Image (tube, rainbow, N blue to C red):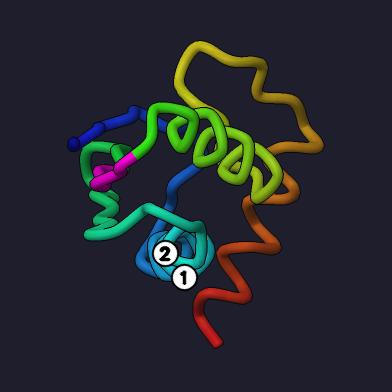
Amino acid sequence: MKAILRIQNVKCNGCATTIINKITKLDDVSSVFVSVEDNTISFNYTKVDQIDQVKSTLKKLGYPEEGEENSIGQKAKSFVSCAIGKL
């Protein structure tokens, strides 16, 4: 099955790289793609509970789903994730 989520704080390809690297490591999640222009992530999954795990991982990285709280802390986490993705 395929899912597409709109996420916040995606600024560049460094962000996308970090997101792809972390989400790809989750069990039963594959074909991860991040669109910087659209602020979306798409991925394939085999179990419904994987969507919640992806959302949780994104939030921990500083990229909460659109409509969720986007605090200063979340924004700061996304800048750190962005920098790591550029390395």
Q: Which residue is mark 1?
A: 21
State left or right for residue 27 relative to residue 44: right
- Mark 2 crowdedness (10 Å alpha carbons): few <14, some 14-19, many ≥20: some
Q: Residue at x 66, y 16 (%)?
A: 69
Residue 15 percent coordinates (x, y):
47, 61
Mark 1: amino acid: Asn
Q: CA distance from mark 1 to mark 2?
A: 5 Å
In the displayed structure, 8 sits above or below 67; it is below
Total marks in image: 2
Taking depth in this image into account, of 3 and 78 the one nearest to the observer is: 3
Q: Position of residue 81 (x, y in %)?
A: 63, 62
Left or right of 63? Residue 45 is left
Q: Quadrant of the C terminus?
A: bottom right
Residues 16 and 76: in front is 16
What residue range appears in magenta?
42-46
Instruction: Report crowding for label 1: few under 14, some 14 to 19, many 20 or more residues within 10 A (C-alpha).
Output: few
Report the quarter where the N terminus lies.
top left
Q: Residue furthest top?
A: 67
Mark 1 or 2: in front is 2
Please tell me whether the stretch drawn in magenta is mainly helix, strand or loop: strand
| Residue type, numbered disc 2 | Thr
Q: Is residue 16 magenta?
A: no
| 13 and 26: which is toward the camera | 26
Tell me if residue 75 comes above or below residue 14 in the rendering: above
Please, what secondary structure does the residue beneath circle 1 have? helix
Residue at 58% x, 15% y is 68
Residue 67 circle label: none
The answer to the question of whether label 1 and label 2 lie on touching residues, with beta carbons closer than 8 A, is: yes
Residue picked out by circle 2: 24
Q: Farthest residue toward the right? A: 73
